[in-house]
Amino acid sequence: MELRITMPSRWLDLTAKQLLYVSRLFLMNYDTTKFLVKAFLFISGLKLQFDRDPEPDGARWFTHKSVKKPFLLDPDQVSEMAKSCEFLLSPDEVNPIRWIGFARSRQYRLYNATFEEYLMAENYYFAYIETKKDEHLDNLIACLYRRPWHWWNAAKIQKRALQFRNVDSAVKNSVFMWYIGFRTYVPKRCKTLFKSKGSGKKRRPFNPREYINGMIHQLNNGDITITDKLLKQSVWDALDELEQRAIDFEMAN
């Protein structure tokens, strides 16, 4: 028997169907071992034969498209193979589910998003982290998804969020995981801007509003008359400019 299984090695390689399944697993709160085994069986295409009893030594019968006949695998073999899914335990960049109803996702690194879209997404991300209220997750989704024929309008976010209220929780969670993955990329590109400031006793508690307003203030140099123009620019134009300013400040001090 030659079992041929091709497994992804990063979040970006997951198909939309695999991402949705993994998202659902996270919502089930399985322990790590059970989570990895379930994820592996689904992604690998291994099928457990429930109609056949286990062998005396605990081995179970499986099928796979690369093998013509059912075959035996013991629990230790399955657990060992399931380690190939350990990358799922660490957040990383995700290709989002492309469509939720008629709403289409932004590019996975938000290259086609404005600075305002990013800041509003950050606001609702922190609100959801803090409260775990679905309304904030719906608002986050409304920042990241919209109908292709609609222009961005920050004033309509909460109204548009209502269309996501009854979306499958696993789909919503996949969007949340996408945004977590996006946030792991940002400090890799803007290393100085997002450099850790340490954790001394005098460090102030993190305040999302101050964090967001601080980025705007850095860009407009205190001139609020140009804020609207800044918000309409590409998110990466804004972040790259902030990164350069952080580098210049570091070098000057």
Image: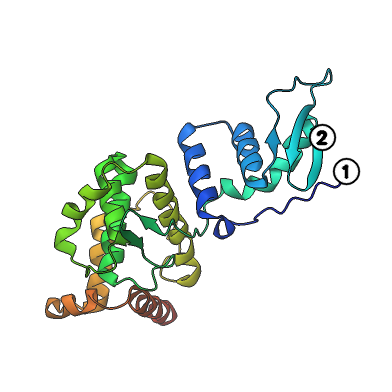
Q: Is residue 204 left or right of residue 40?
A: left
Query: The disc labelled 2 sits on which kind of residue?
Result: Phe
Say which residue label 1 marks: 1
Residue beneath disc 2: 71
Helix, strand or loop status at disc 1 = loop
**55 with respect to 40 (left or right):** right
1 or 2: tag closer to the N-terminus: 1
Q: Quadrant of the N terminus?
A: top right
Q: Above or below — where is 41 with respect to 52?
A: below
Residue 23 screen position, x and y as percent: 48, 43
Residue in the image at 41% along x and 70% along y = 193
Q: Which disc, if any, is residue 51? A: none
Q: Looking at the image, which residue is at 63% across and 46% down? A: 43
Helix, strand or loop for disc 2: strand
Q: Is residue 39 left or right of residue 5?
A: left
Residue in the foreground of this view, choosing between 177 and 250: 177
Name the quadrant containing residue 111.
bottom left
Q: From what the image shows, is residue 186 above or below residue 252?
A: above
Quick check: 234 above or below 200?
below
Q: Could you tell me how far apart the alpha carbons at marks 1 and 2 are, in whole angstroms? A: 8 Å
Residue in view at x 22 percent, y 70 percent: 151
Q: Residue 232, image x and y in percent? A: 23, 76
Quarter of the C terminus within the rendering:
bottom left
